């Protein structure tokens, strides 16, 4: 299954408006990446509702359902072709659990794009269950799209920097996006996890906060320096803040085309974990979010 999506931009489509916006976003991104676009619709079979019908004469066939789903995908393929430039656009309808299907398709993909149509008790919590599971399990870069289908409306990309290897991968992804979309790159390093109301007591400690701030600036500058040499055309703004990482990224990302974060999920069951910062940004950001995991 993954061979058909090798080095392609893959987008999951479930018929929802959010998934359609994600497909449009993916098509425009495929155009700048010069990659094929694969629109994938996964459907569970057999349908639970049909298998519960008590009649021996009933013969269950997936063909009518597959045909209807294929029509939906074909319509979207035609919508996306003008947005994808000269790149091939194809649609696939595959029986199976959406998480399993997209996980397999995304294994060798260049990028996996998902729409977010989740709903929760708090309306700001916008991440759907399928998207939430896939960002935990796929090592391919994943972008969760919400609000807009245009990758470069604001000409700004925000990336979190903490000096880790995964963060470096996120920075590289952000620079690549910025250079293709002529966007400003905002590199954010939030070095304090302390709540702001605790800073008064902290200042009484014998700590040179100016020195710590300068060290944070050095970490940020060193991380960005190598990438700036590779992407000299990208405008870079470096932000060092005492805010919590999530707050800093959400604030800077309010008018960004993309927020990029590295995931540091750790634990006995690695698939079930996502770093706390990346998880919070995914759930609360109003802008598209890219997650880069450890490979």
Image (spheres, rainbow, N blue to C red):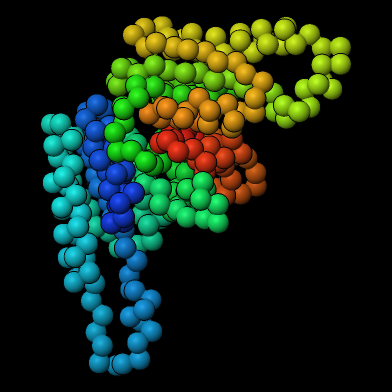
Residue 71 in picture, x, y percent from top left: 16, 59
Q: Residue at x 35, y 18 (%)?
A: 183
Q: Residue at x 65, y 44 (%)?
A: 267
In this rendering, would 41 be left or right of 120?
left
Residue 64 in picture, x, y percent from top left: 18, 72
Residue 267 in view of the camera: yes
In this rendering, would 203 be left or right of 45?
right
Instruction: Classify residue 106 by image quadrant.
Output: top left
Q: Up-down: is 57 above or below 49?
A: below
Q: Up-down: is 155 above or below 210?
A: below
> How many marks overall?
0
Q: Up-down: is 144 above or below 246?
A: below
Q: Residue at x 27, y 48 (%)?
A: 20
Q: Up-down: is 215 above or below 267?
A: above
Residue 130 in picture, x, y percent from top left: 44, 53
Q: Residue at x 23, y 76 (%)?
A: 61
Q: Nearer the viewer, residue 125 or 1?
A: 125
Residue 78 in picture, x, y percent from top left: 13, 46
In this rendering, would 91 be left or right of 217?
left
Residue 109 in view of the camera: no
Q: Nearer the viewer, residue 282 or 89?
A: 282
């Amino acid at each position: 299954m993954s061979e058909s999506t090798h080095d392609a931009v893959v987008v999951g489509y479930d018929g929802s408006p959010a998934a359609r916006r994600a497909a449009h976003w993916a098509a425009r991104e495929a155009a700048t990446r010069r990659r094929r676009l694969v629109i994938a619709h996964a459907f569970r079979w057999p349908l639970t509702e049909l298998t519960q019908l008590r009649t021996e004469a009933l013969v269950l066939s997936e063909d009518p359902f597959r045909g209807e789903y294929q029509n939906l995908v074909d319509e979207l393929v035609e919508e996306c072709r003008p947005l994808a430039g000269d790149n091939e656009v194809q649609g696939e309808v595959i029986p199976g659990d959406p998480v399993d299907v997209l996980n397999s398709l995304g294994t060798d993909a260049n990028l996996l794009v998902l729409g977010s149509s989740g709903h929760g008790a708090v309306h700001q919590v916008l991440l759907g269950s399928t998207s939430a599971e896939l960002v935990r399990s796929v090592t391919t870069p994943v972008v969760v799209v919400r609000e807009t289908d245009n990758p470069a409306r604001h000409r700004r990309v925000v990336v979190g920097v903490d000096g880790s290897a995964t963060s470096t991968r996120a920075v590289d992804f952000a620079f690549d996006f910025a250079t293709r979309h002529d966007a400003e790159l905002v590199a954010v390093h939030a070095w304090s996890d302390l709540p702001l109301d605790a800073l008064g007591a902290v200042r009484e400690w014998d700590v040179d906060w100016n020195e710590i701030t300068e060290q944070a600036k050095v970490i940020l500058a060193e991380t960005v320096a190598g990438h700036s040499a590779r992407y000299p055309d990208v405008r870079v703004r470096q932000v060092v803040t005492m805010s919590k990482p999530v707050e800093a990224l959400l604030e800077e990302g309010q008018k960004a085309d993309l927020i990029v974060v590295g995931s540091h999920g750790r634990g006995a069951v690695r698939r079930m974990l996502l770093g706390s910062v990346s998880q919070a940004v995914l759930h609360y950001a109003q802008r598209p979010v890219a997650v880069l995991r450890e490979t």
